[in-house]
Structure formats: C-alpha cells, structure tokens
Image (spheres, grey):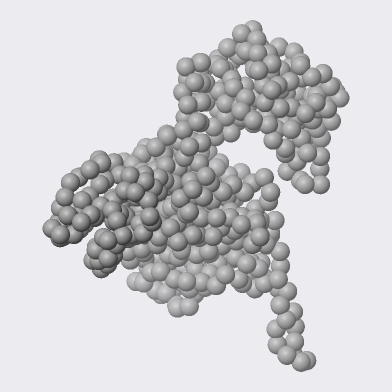
Amino acid sequence: MDITEEMRRHSAAHLVARAVCNLFPGTQTDIGPATDDGFYYDFDLEHRLAPEDFPAIEKEVARLIALDEPFVQANMTQDEVAAKLAGQKYKLERLADVAASGEAISTYTVGDYFEMCIGPHVEHSAQIGAVKLMKVAGSYYRGDEKNKMLQRVYGIVGKDQADLDAKLAQIEEAKKRDHRVLGKDLALFTINDTVGPGLAHWLPRGARVRVAIENYWRQKHYEAGYEIVYTPHVGKSNLWETSGHLGFYKEGMFPVMKVQEGEGKDAYVQDYYVKPMNCPFHIQCYQFNKHSYRDLPVRYAELGTVYRYEKDGVRHGMFRVRGFTQDDAHIFCTPEQIVQEIKDTVEFAKKMLGKFGFHEIQAYLSTKPEKAVGDPARWEQATQSLRDALEQEGMSYEVDEGGGAFYGPKIDMKIKDALGRPWQLGTVQFDFNLPERFNLTYVGPDGKEHQPYMVHRALLGSIERFFGILIEHYAGAFPLWLAPEQVRVLPITDKQLDYAKKIQAALRAKGFRVEVDTGAEKLGAKIRNAQLWKVPYMVVVGGRDEAAEQISVRSRVDGDLGAMKLDDFAAKLSAELDA
C-alpha cells in the first residue's frame, strides 16, 4: 500500500490523542483530522495545555511510534462502538450522528487506543515518521459558539527527522513572508475592527498593485471574448430564494435587511440580502435579451464584490475576509460548444496564472456526488467534457470521485508558491441547477427553445486572497509590473530636489509609478529605506548627475547599474515590462 501524506497526518493525530490521554488521565477527546499541512486534535481536559507541555507529549508520541503497532480497521455496530467509547461524551455524541444512518461503523485500533474513524491510515505506526506539535488554540465544540471551548492542538509530520526539519525551516520562512505582517510593514492593506472584522481597506500602495492586477485582468478578458458587467451589491429575497442560496447557503449570508418600499397605503416591507455570489445577477444580464444559438456562447465577467458572514476563528488576514472581490465569470453555451469553452478556459487560466509567476498547476476533476440534481446523461456529458478539455490541454489531473457540487462537476486548479505550498485558485464548474431554476433558454436551429449549459468560472479566485498569496510568494518584493512603487528618486542633497522632481514627472508621463524621497537622511539611509520598501529601482541624483543631465541607477536585485541617460533608463524599464 502506498503511504500518503494524508495517511501519515491522520495517523499522527490518533497517536497525539493517545499520548495526551496517557499523560493526562480523564481527557475527553473529540475529533482530529488531517489538514492540508498537518493535523489537529480537539481535547477537553482540566490542565491548560501550553507549548511547555509539547516536549513531553512529543516524547510519548515518539515512544508510541517506535512500538510499530498496526492500525487495525473493523466495522462494528453502534452498541459495540458505544461500549468501546464508554465515558467519552463527545465521541458518544458524534456516534449518535453516525449511527442514524443504520450502517456499520468503521473503526480503527492501534495498541490500546480506539477510534471511530473511516481512515485511511498507515499500516504500522512506524510509517508515520517524525511528529512536531506547533501550537494550541481554542475551538468551540462542533464550531458552535454556544458550546464549550475545547483545546485544539496542531502538529506537523515528516517522513523522517530530516524531512521534518525541512518543513520546520519552510514554516520559519513562511513566517517571514506572512502577508499580514508584510501588509502592515509595506503599508499595503489594513483590516480595522472599528469598521468591522474581516473588512479590508486597500491602502494606496496596495491599491496600486490591485489596479495593475485588474487592468491586466480586464484587458485579457476583452481579448478572450468576454463582456464585462457590473451588478448590484444587494438583491431582493425572492432572487435568493429562486437561486437556492436562502435554502442552501443562508448561514453564510449576512442577515436580512428589511426595507420599507412604497408610500402610504401602498407601503410594504421588502427583504433584501447583500450578495454572497454574483451568479444570479449574471443570469439577469443573460435574460435581458432573447438568445439564439447563433448568439452563443455568451461570456460575462465581473470583478464583483460579495459579502459572506465568516465567523470568528475562520477569518484569516486577506485569505478569509467578509467582503471580497471575486474574479468571476459565467459562460452560457450550447452542448456542442462546451468542450471548446472548457478547453479555452483552462488555457486562459494557465496563461493568466503564468503572468503572475505561477507555472506549476495541478488540476483536480471532481465528479458527481451522491446527492445531485440534473439528468444523469448531462452529468456524464459534462464530466467527459471536462476530462476531454484537460487531456487536450495536456494538463495532468487527479480525479476526486464524488467531489463535485450537487449541481455539477468541476475542475479545480492548484498552483504552488515559492515555498512549494499549494493554493487552490482557478475553478471551472458546471451548473445544471440555476438554468432550471431561472428557466434559461435559447432558440436552437430547430426553432425550439433549449436550455443552455452554464459554467461558473474563476481564474484568480478572490482578489483579496490572491493578493495575500502574491505577497507571500514574492515576500513583498513584487516584480516590476506589479510593484506599487517602481522607481524611487533619491536626491543626495536638497539642492537636487527640483531635478529629482523633474525626473519623477518625466517618468510618470511615460506611465511609471515613481516617488521622490524628500527626507533629510543621508544617501545611505535613503538607499536602505528604499530596499526595506522593496522598490525595484532607485535613481540617485547628485550635483554631477544634474550637470551632466543623467541619472545614477541602482537595482533592488543587482545593485549599482551606473550612470545613464533618462531615456535609456525608461527604455530599460519598458523592455523589462514587455518581457
């Protein structure tokens, strides 16, 4: 059996739970899944766990790993599992949920430790490798603030000590790249609780980067045959009832706004919701006209700001906020057009992500889940269309059986950043649900009305999240085309200040983002400041430079580039941008 990262992480969680129970008798355990980069386990015990406890727990985990005991799977009845879990109140409550299905319950035993679990796990504990505990935090039982707060212990796993050391080094490097820290240090964004948690302010320097991203995004979408639309931020409740959001997604939406409409005897109260998604609005754009098959495909794109009620403990810097702008698009097409549309979308995603420095893309094809809507034949055709597009594009992909949404199969695309960490960005998702709910049609060659295929499509995902990823990928040192400040002019003394501003004006007229350091510091300090702000180029101007009508150029990466004429420097910048 091939031992996967997930197996080792999940198995390590079991042994950490076993170790904590051994060291702290009377511990109540809840759940402990594998995560994308490690694992966690939730405990209820009188002792307040702290990092000072980690060495003892890790020593016990190492002892249990060295025993090399097998992980034994067995299917049991509810009564058998309940007997094994006697005294574990959280486990017994979870058991009641699982037992409601009436099916046999999967369990795993390693040594004297028993878990209700579907796995998968390693075959023997020694296959786990080396374990390191990272932090402990509070977590409400079942994620409900009304329930007791448990202690959640996080950890990571390496195949061996060398692998674990490499991961720890990567974590230390990631701390240096933390977008929340760099976002503050480089004055890119702020999230101010005075306004509201999870609501980001893009500061001028961050806004410069966002404008560069959005301008490129719009240009490429027009070139690819998309029409850009702008839609409202709120909509009547009946819109969200028709779309199904109020039925399926209400907990993720902000509470209702009750608005009085009309006057006098005609007055009434109308319920409104801020939008969690853009799709119903793009459908309204599609329905503005009656469509023939000759009009299709119709492609609408929008940098649409949406709002979701993300709770405490879930929000995380720019990665998870309450108000964010989606790189959103919807394609309405005929069944005959679908393969080419998906193929074009995948190719579009590869080019778009490549522009930002992400060239390693892994695709995941998610197929029909157990509970799904729509004709099985359409599901089969849609899934095959996604598969054909990936294969024709030569993209490697993995199949996530049953991982599609209830309304259609999808392709998810993950990139790797400079530290090798995976991030899901692009997605291409079929939808059989909304065309039926909104009765979308087009007139076919036979003169009859047909239902179009609808595809949800994002290339970058949330602009806020993508910005956070870019900050960490580049450690704040953006390439020239994205840098909020591309050039900083450094006058050696105040006597060159007018010349510095003349240089600034000339470069700004050519479209470059340029600032002048007007401070009283010496040149060495100005250079250090520009380096700290991660400015790609510094233009030093002294008396001799002004007299010779030239500039002295320094690169953030290559250091001193020597003296040159302003036009030559501008040409150098333009060539770098073109490249």
One can see residue 242 in this view:
no
Q: Is residue 248 left or right of residue 218?
A: right
The image quadrant of residue 531 is: top left
Q: State the residue lying farthest toward the bottom.
A: 264
**Residue 248 vs residue 181, the one in the foreground:** 181
How far from the left and from the top, in percent, is residue 537? 28, 50
**Residue 2 vs residue 181, the one in the foreground:** 181
**Residue 499 vs residue 351, the one in the foreground:** 499
One can see residue 289 in this view:
yes
Q: Which residue is drawn at 76% across and 16% down?
A: 23
Q: Residue at x 46, y 68 (%)?
A: 450
**Residue 507 vs residue 183, the one in the foreground:** 507
How far from the left and from the top, in percent, is residue 229? 44, 71
The image quadrant of residue 334 is: bottom left
Q: Which residue is drawn at 59% across and 20% down?
A: 131
Q: In this view, does 21 lie to the left or right of 171?
A: right
How far from the left and from the top, in percent, is residue 326? 49, 59
Residue 26 sits above or below residue 284 on the image: above
Q: In this view, does 180 lie to the left or right of 398?
A: right
How far from the left and from the top, in percent, is residue 434? 55, 63
Residue 446 sits above or below residue 4 on the image: below
Q: State the residue lying farthest toward the right.
A: 87
